[in-house]
Amino acid sequence: MRARVIVLLLPLAACALADDSAMSWSGAPKMMHGNTTVRMVSEKVIVKTPIDSDFQSSFDCNFVFHNDGPATDIRIGFPDRANGAYTEDYFNTGSSDKPTFYELKNFKSWVDGKLVKTTLLVDKNSPDANYAGSWHTKTVHFPANTTVNVRDTFTQRQSGGIGTTNNYISMVRYVMSTGASWKGNIGSAEVDVIIPGMKSAKPFPGKPDTATAYTHWTDQPKGTIFYTGFAAPTQDGNTLIFKRNDFKPTLDSDIYVVWQAVEHTGGG
């Protein structure tokens, strides 16, 4: 008899920006209940941003898992979360009935190269009424002592908002910490973030989810990127490459890449 385990993905906390911010994000699989014999062998994510005039970013996420034990079925959910301006068309915070929300567009999923159906489920247990959220879910069968490949692709609008120094910033986030609940450590992880116009990259001066993290922008040349994540990235042209082997991710592992999108020269 196959064991059944529920898996969901959790979001990263929102950035501390002005009220006219717009946030969306996604992340890596998280085991929600019990133990598992399935481990994440590798994770490779390619983020291209933006890909069109609507500031959509594309995500191509490839996971390799290995089941070290008996056959099991695991329900996996991919998060679709947003707040601020991106929830206005989907979510009425004054209503107890939360509509099905989707910010991730054209979501597709494959298991061992086969396109599989996913079901969009509303997140009825959101801890914060200011967020809208749903889950793109599927059940994956892991045969005994076997490797399984999972791929998810989608597009989503870039997060952004007005910072504390009257400048507009764009951001991309990818949550690594949710991968900590699989068996053992992640064997290898790589997240490539492609940003046209990137000139240089610097680590965030402090935590990226505090308002003071955005006071430095007026002193930075155009094309400066700030980041935090599970590794100090290397820069290859306009691509930031985060790579690390054999580690258990924590909240500090979450990737957060921010850049100044529009230069403001004064008031308004």
Image (cartoon, rainbow, N blue to C red):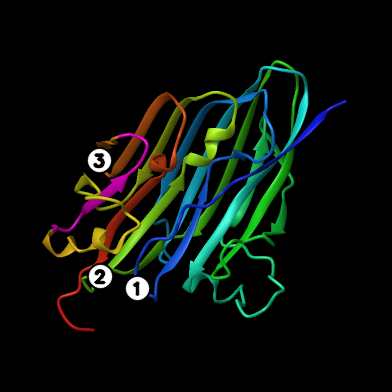
Q: Is residue 52 left or right of residue 212?
A: right
Q: Which residue appears at 66% of the width and 46% of the height?
A: 77
Give the Cα distance between marks 1 and 2.
Answer: 7 Å
Give the Cα distance between marks 1 and 3.
Answer: 31 Å
Q: Nearer the viewer, mark 1 or mark 3?
A: 1
* Residue 2 image offset from top left, x and y in percent: 83, 28
Tell me the SS state at disc 3. Answer: loop
Label 3 Cα neighbours within 10 Å, binned few <14 / some 14-19 / many ≥20: few
In the image, residue 196 above or below residue 38: below
**Residue 190, picture quadrant:** top left
* Residue 24 image offset from top left, x and y in percent: 49, 60
Q: Which residue is mark 2?
A: 164
First-in-chain label (1 vs 3): 1
Give the Cα distance between marks 2 and 3.
Answer: 29 Å
First-in-chain label (1 vs 2): 1
Q: Which residue is mark 1?
A: 18
First-in-chain label (2 vs 3): 2
Q: Which mark is residue 237?
A: 3
Q: Which mark is residue 27?
A: none
Q: Which residue appears at 49% of the width and 55% of the height?
A: 25
Amino acid beneath label 3:
Gly
Q: Quadrant of the N terminus?
A: top right
Tell whether label 2 touches label 1 (CB within 8 Å). Answer: yes
Tell me the SS state at disc 2. Answer: loop
Label 2 Cα neighbours within 10 Å, binned few <14 / some 14-19 / many ≥20: some
Amino acid beneath label 1:
Ala
Please count the marks in the image.
3
